[in-house]
Image (cartoon, rainbow, N blue to C red):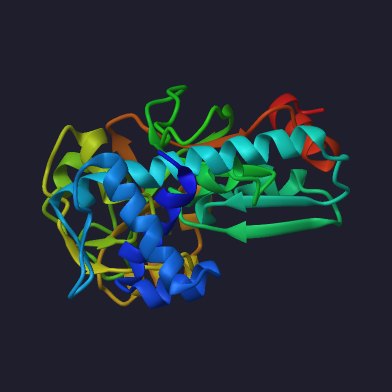
Amino acid sequence: MDPHLLRTYVTVARRASFSEAARELGYTQSAVSQHIAALEQDLGAPLLTRRPVTPTAAGERLLEHAGPLLLRLDAARADVVRMAAAPAHGLTLAAAPTALGPAVLAALPAAGVTLRVLTRDAIPAAVATGTADLGLVDGVAAPSDPLRLPDVAPLTTHGVAEEPVSVLLPTGHPLAGRTGLRLGDLADARWLDAPDAALPLAHLRAANGGGAFRPALRYEGTDLRALTALTAAGHGLTLLPRPTATGVPGTVAVPLTAPRVVHRTELVHGGAPRGAAAELVRRLVYGA
């Protein structure tokens, strides 16, 4: 399939409008209609209903494939451009909020860094497409086990830190006086669902081999201060790296004793890093 036609189709489906897609892409509305017609002819199936503009069943299936396909094309372009370009003097680092542990912060250059705090799933894509030179992703894993990352492009990962994890509770919580907690005993507790700030509930379920872990409140953001304030106010428990959870006003951080898991941080890059990116890789991975 012609990727230009595919990109036009994705834009029309997302905007639910031929005219809005034309404005976004810088085409005429007639050109957009011709792109969609050509793609439908190529595939031998209608992809969109016209009034209203919505994907057909075949169009929905194509959308499932289109995002990863276009991302891989963007990643391939970025990889080639990265190899051909002169080494950059600065460094753009994409990171999950809880990936910025003490070791990472100590290794950052004194100047020339642009830090982008993104959702965990967005970080590999940012590195693959060249909008970030390096990425820092994190999650819950068994000690020394690698994280499972989305397959968006050929990327290299390095484990750079492993830390204990703690359950963050408000000071008045009945379990706040415990010296340790088992995850299995907390499956039915009130939890905060904060997939882009805390360690995600899906990771807890996987580590525990199941369990409800139902959210009492969902927080869609990356601000750790807002997240811990919600816990302090009694809106739900959350799981955090121990250094992040320790010393938060109005809360108690109780170590997780079972199962035996850690907060793991991995450095992600594409190709061979150069310049400031290569220097940060050396510091974090090799301690140089």
Q: Position of residue 242 (x, y in %)?
A: 47, 48
222, above or below 69, in the image: below
For residue 33, what is the image quadrant? bottom left
**Percent x, y of residue 25:** 52, 67
Q: Tell me how many marks there are.
A: 0
Residue 183 in which image quadrant: top left
Placement of 136 over or under 287, stated as above or below: below
139 over 225 or under it: above or below = above
Which residue is nearer to you in this view: 245 or 76?
Answer: 76
Residue 49 visible in the shown view: yes
Residue at figure coordinates x 31%, y 77% from the top left: 233
Q: Is residue 52 above or below residue 94?
A: below
Q: Is residue 148 left or right of residue 83?
A: left
What residue is rendered at 44% in x and 53% in y?
7
Q: Position of residue 199 (x, y in %)?
A: 37, 50
Q: Tell me if 160 is positioned left or right of 70 in this view.
A: right
Report x, y in % for residue 261.
Answer: 36, 32
Note whether residue 182 is visible: no
Left or right of residue 135, residue 47 in this image = left
Q: Nearer the viewer, residue 40 or 53?
A: 40
Task: Give the quadrant of the C terminus.
Answer: top right
Q: Residue at x 85, y 46 (%)?
A: 88
Q: What quarter of the picture does the N terminus occupy?
A: top left
